[in-house]
Image: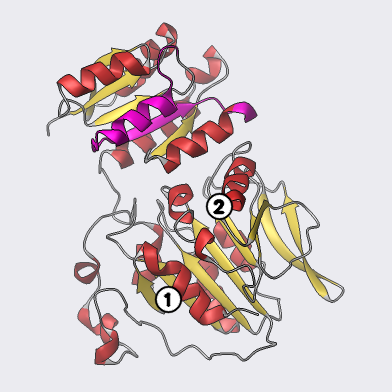
Amino acid sequence: MKKKNILIIDDSALMRRMLSDIINSDERFIVVDTASNGLEAFDKITLRPDSYDIILLDINMPKMNGIEFMEQINRLKLKLTVVVVSTIAAEGAAETIRLLELGAFDFVTKPTSILQAKGNTFRDRLLECVSCAAGFFTAQETRIPLRQSVKTETLLKSSKPEELTESTLVLRKPHKPVGTGAKKLVALACSTGGPKALQQVIPFLPKNLDAPMLIVQHMPAGFTASLAARLNDLSEVTVKEAADGDRLEKGTVYIAKGGTQMKLAKSGGSYRIQLTDEPPRKGLRPCADIMYESLLTSDFDDITCVVLTGMGGDGTAGIRQLCDKHNIYVIGQDAASCTVYGMPKVLFEAGLTDVVVPLKDVANAIIKNVGAR
């Protein structure tokens, strides 16, 4: 197998060395070049645009920083796979979100000490991210076309021939529509590629959406506040990082706080957010399964579950439990528009998806089921 060529862009010689040692320790990759700033890297890439399979990008650098570098890459319409290696400091969170908007595949939080940099946690996370960016997907995380990934009889189950279009596939038993005045909730899960995907969903929801919305986006602490602020600036609905005790309001989107688990609990006649410090599940905190499971005892008349791009299968187990007890409508993103077709694929192959749509149609699918006040 031919090794994937990696370019490292970082103004720290020590960090370039550490990253190189980690990448070169995996026989699938080789660091073929480094650069100390975005301008140096930009010159190398424009001279040899096909020389690098993956780029590791720092943010704060002299001459040309990470954001300026990505803006120039986009201006020239160069198709590059970029993984951001950023500081976890709060002042770097907004810049990281901006880089994801500009097309970065994902980000890895830079270690704060030499000891952390040499530890297995950072090494494993970096190699996992680079592996996924390189296309070394697991059985669950593939870019296989949707129609080739599911047996014909699964597609035909409970479906009318006219519903089996390129953009829409109905897989589960018919959903029971609810009327006006019903209690409704939207609960969305996403991971790799999620921040950029959310920008094609949340800003297209109406201010008077007839339901509150919960979002679990896999992110560490320090980043979700910036993600929420950015989406709020772009949207008619109110978007905020969830806080413990928040009372659910229609037309408001609550993004799970990075590094915590988000649940929903009834308090009097309303529902409130609960943030807990319970351990990660399968390495995830926040975890979508935990969010969905907290809805099992709720009395919503209709729950719209949405699963977008991401590695792994988070969300499927929780939605499967909800399916047995609640009237739910499940929207999955299609393979072609996913950064990583993992989470929606697992959900789809479990037979839990009501409708599969490209990313550009997710907002309309939510509005069609939820309605507006």
Examine the rendered structure and indicate whether residue 323 appears above or below residue 128. Answer: below
Mark 2: amino acid: Leu
Left or right, residue 34 beside residue 104: left
- In percent of width and height, residue 52 lies at 21, 27
Residue annotated with mark 1 = 352
**Mark 1 residue element:** loop
Q: Position of residue 194 (x, y in %)?
A: 46, 51
The front one of 292 and 373 is: 373
Who is closer to the viewer here, 316 or 360?
360
Q: Specify the amino acid type for callout 1.
A: Leu
Residue at image x 44%, y 49%?
Answer: 196
Query: Could you give the CA–CA distance between mark 1 and mark 2, rounded to whole angstroms?
Result: 31 Å
Which residue is pictured at 55% across the width and 43% down the height? 219
**Residue 348 in which image quadrant:** bottom left
Q: Which residues are magenta?
A: 62-91
Residue 365 lies in what quarter of the image? Answer: bottom left
The residue that appears at 21% across and 80% down in the rendered structure is: 152
Q: Is the residue under label 2 in contact with that under label 1 (CB below 8 Å)?
A: no
Q: Nearer the viewer, residue 139 or 63?
A: 63
Q: Earlier in the sequence, mark 1 or mark 2?
A: 2
Residue at screen point 70% across, 87% down: 181
Q: Quick check: can you spot residue 167? A: yes
Q: Secondary structure at mark 2?
A: helix
Whether residue 109 appears in magenta in the rendering, the answer is no
Residue in the foreground of this view, choosing between 80 and 155: 80
Where's the N terminus, which quadrant? top left
Q: Position of residue 95 (x, y in %)?
A: 52, 32
**Where does residue 367 sit, x and y in percent of width and height?**
52, 75
Reading the image, the residue beneath label 2 is 234
Q: How many marks?
A: 2
Residue count near mark 2 (Cα–Cα under 10 Å), binned few <14, some 14–19, many ≥20: some
